[in-house]
Amino acid sequence: MRRDGAPALGQFAHNLREAPRRLREAAVRGGRPTTDRTRSTFVFNNVFLHLHAVRTHRWSLRWTTTAGLGIASVAAFLITLVTGILLMFYYKPYPDVAYDSMKDIHFVVPTGRFVRNLHRWAANVMVVAVILHMARTFYTAAYRAPREFNWLVGMALLVTTLGLSFTGYLLPWDQLAYWAITIGANIAQSPREVTDALGVTQAFDPGGLQRLLLLGSDTVGEEALIRFYLLHVILLPLIAGMLMAVHIWRIRKDGGLAKPPDVDARLGDPPPATYPVFTEAPTKTYHLAAIVRGRTPAVGGGPENTVPSMPHLFYAEAAVLMLTLLICMALSLVSDAPLKELANPLVPENPAKAPWYFLGLQELVAFSAFMGGIGIPTIVLVGLGLIPFLDREQAGTGVWFGGPGGWPLVRNSIAVGFAAALILESFAIQFGWLREWVPGIPQLVITAVNPGTVLTFVYAAYSLWLVRLFNSARAGALGLFTCFLCGFVVLTVIGTYFRGPNWQFYWSPADWPVH
Amino acid sequence: MTVTPGHPRSRLDPEPVPRRDFLGLLSFWTMATTLLFATLGMLRMPRAAVLPSPSKKFRVAIPEALPPGEAYVPPGRTTAIFRDAQGTYAISIVCTHLGCIVKPTPDGFECPCHGSVFARDGAVVRGPAPQPLSWIKVEAGGGTVVVDEAATVAAGTKVTA
Ligand code: HEM
Ligand code: FES
């Protein structure tokens, strides 16, 4: 086709010359991000960046608001993603061969040991970051309406994160892996503890089904390894990635991070050097906001205290990413990921310990498999999920330890939480538990009454008392969450440092009997 | 729309449920049902119909010198075989708590994982194990016994050759 009567060849040459410029324009639609306006276009024209709002409130950018923990979780996830893909070049998911390939990665493959360490450490950092991030959103009461849904998405992310770590734990196929998964799979089967006691296992056996689905067999073997591999490298990462996208996009839809109503007064004027706060009049208005339910970026607070996300938010995010990477790299240089002997299905590792974040549960499992492994985790998850629906108060949103009682209440709850857990554990370690006093006691009694359930009961009673005392659900939630966090710490520390062979209590590994 | 008697509905009148809506809803629910059943069907797959584990039945010769009441665990198996005056019997050494392998001791069995202790007949003495160790089916014949780890028998069942 000829245009303007120009010869086709001439047009062709012209198009060819113009191609690089047009390619650039096609990639960076809306012009170079050099002004506030083009930066905004840049953000909302990009599918990844537009998960963020175009402008960010100054409150959200303060370190004390988030401590960067959410982004640190994303960063750790990205590190595991990259290092995980690298590991997949050499890892072979087949029993025994898997162990050899881990050894190859560790000792032969160039940079293999470092990449493996990085993967392992980033996974641990992610678990820590996610737990701390949950604590930060809890203590700043950021879960309240309209953020209930995002709190639930966050909980799904918590479970997915733990699932990713747990499925990864089996892959090296060493003693540590094999016995941790054997125990894990039997925890999945532990509803049998109840169905057996009721004598209905023949007819109704959810525990057996769960274990069968997890292992694909009745022992931990090649079927189980393939299943865990599948979950670890495809299914759970995909779920985690999707949930993260939803989670971060929801923040924007919920009107940015939670902030106190008097946020402008608290922040004061932006420092004079702040660059740039509205260098041009915005050309985009939020007409759409009118039809979107709930609060949107432009509602309930003028744009006065917002700054363009690009570059302010992105600099902050990049800083957190670099910091997370730095921490993971430093840890990987100092400490190698463990690799024990090849898995031996006949000789349990003694003591056989799960990954550290499950050792608190393992401590409870050592009293009742069902309660410690399924009952109490379920109670905790349901409790966490209910928080935003039970606490419909306003006071203290967006402020650390906000709400009736505030920091003094949290401080006292820390004392109560630690004291209750320590007293109960010392008691059980010193004097044993029901079966040691009353041999032949029915299993159901132990399942119902064990240190785990007693602790849960004490915490729940304490927090109900707080609800009455302060006449506020938030006060109860503050107490309960704090107590559970303390209980988690106590049990995890005992499980990690003070349990030796046969799960006996030892003050230090130096006292362990030689075996 | 109103239908007055004696006045047949005209083709121009709107239908009670517009045909488009009806067909739309119908195809939507057809799709939903199809997807539901497809999903249910797919869910059946991860549940293995035949378990790939090796046979649990094996024949083994008990060492002649095995003292009465002392455990013999055939290599690679998870069953302890005993012999005493009343006959031969076998007890599983898979802990009923969370599946670790228990260690036979002079007084019974000890589990390394969470410290369950079992008596010589497999009864729980202490620790979190909810059930006694199971007794395994043995058939004695000549110098060897056939053990079927998949079959349990009542505690106390001993066989003589
Ligand atoms: C893989 C796990 C997770 C990732 C990657 C993640 C990521 C993020 C990010 C980047 C933010 C922005 C603010 C910040 O950095 O604090 C955020 C906010 C939030 N997250 Fe998460 N999160 C995760 C897990 C959780 C969990 C376990 C919960 C709670 C159960 C949770 C609840 C929330 C809530 C309610 C907000 C809004 C906070 C506010 O408005 O101030 N998230 N998350
Ligand atoms: S597996 Fe034997 S006590 Fe836990």
Image (tube, coloured by chain):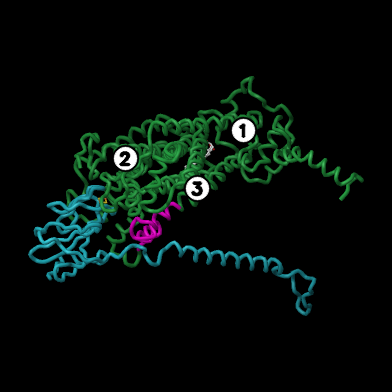
Chain colours: A green, B cyan
Q: Nearer the viewer, residue B75 or A155?
A: B75
Q: Are marks 3 and 2 in contact (CB under 8 Å)?
A: no
Residue appearing at x 29%, y 57% in the figure: A193
Is residue A258 shown left or right of residue A128? right
Ligand 1 within 8 A of label 1's CB? no
Comes first in the chain, label 3 or label 1: 1
- Chain to which the residue tagged by mark 2 belongs: A
Three-letter amino acid code at the position of disc 2: Leu
**Quadrant including the C terminus of chain A:** top left
Residue B136 found in image quarter: bottom left
Range of residues picked out in magenta: A205-229
Q: Nearer the viewer, mark 3 or mark 2?
A: 3
Residue bearing mark 1: A56
- Residue placed farthest to the bottom in the image? B6
Q: Which residue is mark 3?
A: A237
Residue depicted at x 69% and y 68%: B17
Residue B16 or A398: which is nearer the viewer?
Answer: A398
> Pointer 2: what residue?
A491
Q: Position of residue A48 (x, y in %)?
A: 61, 41
* In the foreground, B154 or A325: A325
Q: CA distance from mark 1 to mark 2?
A: 40 Å
Q: Position of residue A190 (x, y in %)?
A: 32, 55
